[in-house]
Image: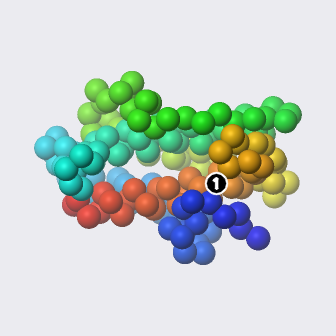
Amino acid sequence: MAPTTPYTPQLAGRDPLEAMAGSAAKFEQVTRAWTPPDYERTMGPGKWSARLVLIHLAQSEIAFGSRARLALTTPDYASQNFDQDAWLPFDEGMSGQDATLALIALMHMNLAMYRRLTTGQRETPFSHPAYGALTVDWIIHQQAGHHVHHLRQLQELR
């Protein structure tokens, strides 16, 4: 049975690895012809620009991929929270194009790892301070749904 994450509804029952592969291609397609001003569009006042969403997504790839790798290699691994708003300023100077390239490269890296995992590896447990007992498979589902959520936002901006 698939794990339930905050982004489970975004997957609508799709295989998370297929969703990830499709999202990587779609992020590139959506932003392909964007100019620097296009990356600065927002969904509304006080919302992140498309560029900041892409930076957030690349940072999330780092966080989710690291959590999975640490869970797979560290007995009794306990994940840490990360504050997306506190992380964003560290990479805020990236261009939209560079953020897109980083995101796509990191997505492919994580997807290649996830595709090689056995069922047993995907069931590797770890703990999280906010969500409790989780598995690497939970990370995969969370990450795939997170992609779909933000991809829809960027498609609306197109």
Residue 116: % across, % down: 72, 51
Relative to 49, is 154 above or below?
below
Q: How many marks?
A: 1
Q: Secondary structure at mark 1?
A: helix
Please, is residue 5 above or below residue 49 in the view?
below
Q: Which residue is mark 1?
A: 140
Q: Is residue 13 left or right of residue 157?
A: right
Q: Residue at x 56, y 53 (%)?
A: 143
Q: Is residue 25 visible?
A: no
Where is residue 17 drawn, in percent x and y? Answer: 61, 60
Label 1 neighbour load within 10 Å: few <14, some 14-19, many 20+: many
Residue drawn at x 85%, y 54% is 120
Q: Residue at x 19, y 44 (%)?
A: 40
Colouring scheme applied when the structure was drawn? rainbow
Question: In the displayed structure, would residue 123 be above or below residue 81?
Answer: below
46 sits to left or right of 9: left
Q: Amino acid at mark 1?
A: Ile
Q: Quadrant of the N terminus?
A: bottom right
Residue 25: quarter of image = bottom left
Q: Say which of 91 and 80 sits in front.
A: 80
Counting from the top left corner in percent of width and height, residue 146 is at 50, 56
Q: Residue furthest bottom?
A: 13
Frontmost residue, 18 versus 157: 157
Instruction: Give the x, y percent position of residue 105.
Output: 47, 41
Seen in the image, is 36 located left or right of residue 27?
Answer: left
Q: Position of 125 compared to 69: left or right?
A: right
Residue at image point 59% right, 42% down? 64
Q: Quadrant of the C terminus?
A: bottom left
